[in-house]
Amino acid sequence: MKKDRLALVAIAVAVLLAVVAGLIGWGAGHYTNRTKTVGTATTAAPATVDPGIAAGAHDFVQFACAQCHGANGQGGVSPDVPALTQVGKELTVGQLTNIIDHGLGESANPKKPYMPVWGAVISKRQVSELVAYIRAGLPSVADATPVSVPQGQGDAVAGAALYVRDGCINCHGPNGLGGVPNPVSEDKTIPSLSGLDFRQEFNTDKKIEDVIRSGSVLGRAPIVSMPHWGGILSDSQLRELVAYLKTLK
């Protein structure tokens, strides 16, 4: 009897193992049939852009053209600043070059934006790149985007970003150190926005805000002129720029 019981137990264990093995095999096959092999992901190559036009798009951002003429020259920033989407078809290379070099606008009214004189700051190559970009219809170019302005991190932090985004850094230099040549001007360089002389001349927030609004030496090419931002920058943005300038040396 004992041997019979052992035989029955052995048979039962064998059957149980067979059932378990079958279930495992079924489950593995079922799962395999429901899954797909994942291959290496492929990404499309970025569209090729003419290097001259691409450079013009980055110049357009670097020199703050977008802050007045809008992204891709679409306008909409101020009723006094035209969109540039049709300009490339309407003006010649020579006309566009002359406007970039000598500026354009209503110099007497600080509430009306005036395009600065760029001739002594932007190289001939950069001007030609800008002209090529405009005449190509100002297409979108990857990574040619203005610096973002941080929010909720204080006026000085926002002002530091505005200083770059709005092109102040191109003429007044990093940290407002100045030194950019302005050969026909009295001082021969664009003034710094830091140091004792600046602090003494612009010793109140209002004086700094006023000169940003009204600009300087407008319409006197070939002297490099500071545009007046009165019709472009908001009061809060002016306050943020002043806060940043007051952190400088």
Image (cartoon, grey):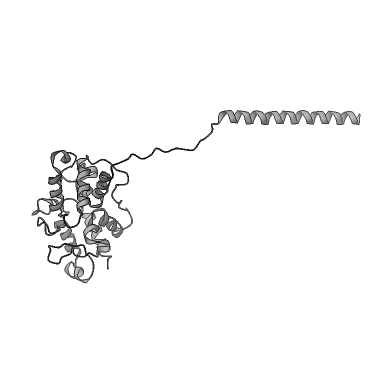
In the displayed structure image, the side of residue 43 where residue 181 appears, left or right: left
Depth check: give the residue in front, 122 or 24: 122
Which residue is painted at 24% across and 44% down in the image? 71
**Quadrant including the N terminus:** top right
Q: Position of residue 56 (x, y in %)?
A: 24, 47
Q: Position of residue 137 (x, y in %)?
A: 22, 39
Which residue is painted at 78% across and 30% down in the image? 14
**Residue 164 against residue 142 in the figure, above or below:** below
Q: Is residue 80 in view from this perspective?
A: no
Which residue is painted at 19% across and 66% down in the image? 204
Farthest residue to the right: give it. Answer: 1
In the displayed structure image, the side of residue 188 where residue 46 appears, left or right: right
Q: Position of residue 44 (x, y in %)?
A: 39, 37
Task: State which quadrant residue 241 falls in.
Answer: bottom left
**Residue 196 against residue 44 in the figure, above or below:** below
Task: State which quadrant residue 88 falls in.
Answer: top left
How many tags in the picture? Answer: 0
**Quadrant including the C terminus:** bottom left
Depth check: give the residue in front, 238 or 108: 108
**Residue 127 against residue 3 in the figure, above or below:** below
Q: Position of residue 174 (x, y in %)?
A: 27, 61
Q: Is residue 120 in view from this perspective?
A: yes
Task: State which quadrant residue 164 falls in.
Answer: bottom left
